[in-house]
Image (tube, rainbow, N blue to C red):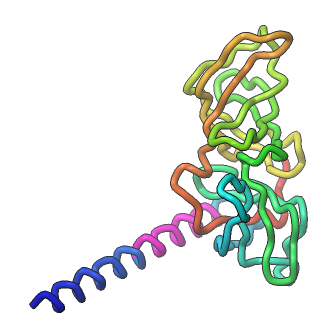
Amino acid sequence: MRSELDKLKMENVFLKNELNTADRAKALAVFQSHTPSKTLAARIIGTGAGANSKVVFVDRGTASGVQRGMGVVTPDGIVGKVIAAYPTASQVALITDSDFAAGVVTQKGGVHGTLKGQGTPQCRVDYVAIEEKVEAGELLFTSGDDRIFPRGFAAGVVKSVRPGQPFQEILAEPTGLQRGLEDVLILVEGVHQ
């Protein structure tokens, strides 16, 4: 009886994982069909060495048309950019990596800034003048200024805003990493408006 119960529990876990994988694949397919940019689906196959690594590896490389500098996204938002491409795999620096930067714009006021990784779960938004109005809870979207991410992809949510000189001190939580990473889309050909 106990072995039958254990077998059923394992089968239940397996089926739940299969359902989650199917749900993620469907969400990626729907997102892929609605974005004008040409994208390539990829799966995360590993993470960089070290507990604080902000790098992942995906199962697509130069043989699939992936090149260094391409953006990586999910339906929830931007994830990072390709920093090295090999024949069958690529290395992606996550949005939280201290070398990452992307142009962003606020949802309400259209205020432009630069989203930068800090090596922590939150990013900062640089170059927002003190007189610009930015509020906690406001959504950030890619501005297209960096020529990596086309305008309009979700980037993050403003968590805190403090006055500074000459720029405000703004922290944001990335939306693309909130549900964990398994499947991503690589922007093979971004459509910039």
Q: Relative to residue 72, is residue 149 depicted above or below? A: above
Query: Residue at (84%, 64%) from the top-left corner?
Result: 189
| 125 is higher (above) or lower (below) than 68 | above
How far across and how far down the image is residue 9, in percent?
Answer: 24, 80
Q: Which percent across, then down, holds residue 61?
A: 82, 77
> Is 174 situated left or right of 191 in this image?
left
Q: Is residue 5 magenta?
A: no
Q: Quadrant of residue 125?
A: top right
Query: Magenta part mainly helix, strand or loop?
Result: helix
In the depicted structure, whether residue 17 falls above or below residue 151: below
Q: Residue furthest front?
A: 50
Given residues 176 and 147, the one toward you in this image is: 176
Residue 50 falls left or right of residue 98: left
- Residue 138, x across and y down, in percent: 59, 27
State how many labels appear: 0
Q: Is residue 29 in the magenta section?
A: yes
Whole-percent x, y for residue 101 in the image? 82, 42
Magenta span covers which residues?
19-33
Which quarter of the figure is the N terminus placed in? bottom left
Residue located farthest toward the left when viewing the structure as drawn: 1
Seen at 80% across and 44% down, the residue is 98
Residue 122 falls in image quadrant: top right
Name the residue rendered at 73%, 70% in the picture.
57
Q: Nearer the viewer, residue 108 or 121?
A: 121
